[in-house]
Image (cartoon, grey):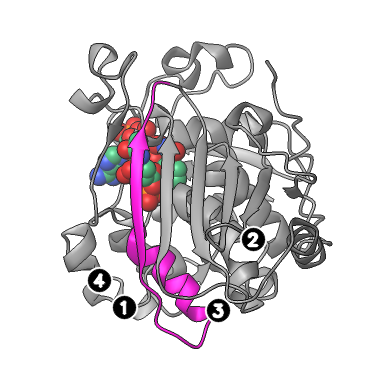
Amino acid sequence: MKVAIVGGSGYGGVELARLLQQHPNVNLTQIISHSQAGANFSEIYPQMTTIIDEPMKDLNLEKLADDIDLVFLATPSNVSHRFVSDILEANLKCIDLSGDLRLKDPALYKSWYNFETTAEAYLDQAVYGLSEIYQDQISEANLIANPGCFPTAGLLALIPLIENQIISTESIIIDGKTGVSGAGRGLSLNVHFSEMNENTKAYQLGNHKHIPEIEQELSEKSNDSIMVNFTPHIIPMTRGILMTSYTNLMIEQTNEQITELYQSYYQDQPFVRIRENGQIPSTKEVYGSNYCDIGFQVDSRTNKLIVVSVIDNLVKGASGQAIQNLNIMAGWDQRTGLHQIPIYP
Ligand SMILES: NC(=O)C1=CN([C@@H]2O[C@H](COP(=O)(O)OP(=O)(O)OC[C@H]3O[C@@H](n4cnc5c(N)ncnc54)[C@H](OP(=O)(O)O)[C@@H]3O)[C@@H](O)[C@H]2O)C=CC1
Ligand SMILES: CC(=O)N[C@@H](CCC(=O)OP(=O)(O)O)C(=O)O
């Protein structure tokens, strides 16, 4: 299959390029850049020297359609909703890494993303690309809304509990920690070395754009309309997301029962690993890989189930999951090209 990346000079783009180089069935034929077309990819990313030395191109959808089968959009929010109709009309399949197509209710874009969507007609068509949960729909799709990094880790931990009705749908509290690469390659005060080094910050309390995404997907799996409290924190590491979810048990459960529940839910899913015997995963244990690791503890004193889920934000949280979705769409084994073992230490 021939593919292109739009937004190739960003972190999601270079991670896609790295992973696609190791994919046996994919030919990455074009890397497209908005501001750096003409520059050699390996000049922007010297680690790609001798691996991808070609110049990045301008976006020309007509020419692109003759050359490729599928396009990855690794562009910031408020970009891809403007491209999507042209891409689909050109008969291209599309996997969008941004949030532009994830929310089903168009009104939510104004309130949470601060722009009006022009892709209202495509929001229903876009399949939410949480690979483990929507495999059947993904296999039939031509348009994928790849999930956000925090939602990927949070939803993989919470959906099995919601579907099995063992936790209350009220008072779900999620605490998220992210490395700075989650903010992309652009410079900003938030990720300035002296702001971030030896520092930790909570941000966007009650108004982070991943809240409606998490609520939409949890509500979809429940009979209730679910609201959550989610607070992200940025911490001084490059990659990684760690989500701690605090839930109220509706029926008494032991750690062994929860292990069984998760293991049975994810028994056919190679990228979700359930930790046993009270082991709690850390971000380095998935670094550079497409795994989501889940650990938990029943706190019988307070009747809570506390779940910790970790991913690499750039792999399972973005580019890795996008390739997993490509594999599912193409009917290949979902692990194709994604065999990276976590880098540790
Ligand atoms: N970083 C992460 O951990 C995650 C990111 N995502 C999402 O993936 C997408 C890419 O993120 P990331 O790579 O980190 O971001 P970056 O800021 O690193 O890269 C975004 C790229 O988009 C291109 N771009 C900017 N404006 C436009 C435009 N108007 N039209 C076309 N291209 C444009 C830029 O490249 P150029 O100017 O060269 O074209 C830029 O390099 C975002 O939507 C992000 O939210 C999702 C999950 C996790
Ligand atoms: C550290 C940092 O700023 N992280 C970003 C992660 C968002 C992201 O990349 O996800 P989307 O695809 O939904 O934009 C944030 O909190 O907005």
Asked whether the beta carbons under mark 3 and mark 4 sit within 8 Å of each other, the answer is no
Q: Which residue is mark 2?
A: 131
Crowd band around label 3 with a 10 angstrom C-alpha radius: few (<14), some (14–19), many (20+):
some
Give the mark toward the camera: 2 or 3.
3
Magenta-tinted stretch: 210-236
The residue under label 1 is 105
Q: CA distance from mark 2 to mark 3?
A: 15 Å
Image coordinates of residue 74 in percent, x first then y, are 43, 44
Residue visible at 17% across and 66% down in the picture: 111
**Residue corresponding to mark 3:** 221
> In 3D space, how far apart are the residues under numbered discs 2 and 4 (Cα atoms)?
23 Å
Asked whether the residues under the numbered discs 2 and 3 touch, taking CB atoms below 8 Å apart as contact, a structural biologist would say no
The answer to whether 175 is drawn above or below residue 305 in the figure is above
Q: Going from the N terminus, do you reach mark 2 or mark 3 first?
A: 2
Residue type highlighted by circle 3: Lys
Mark 2 or 4 closer to N-term? 4
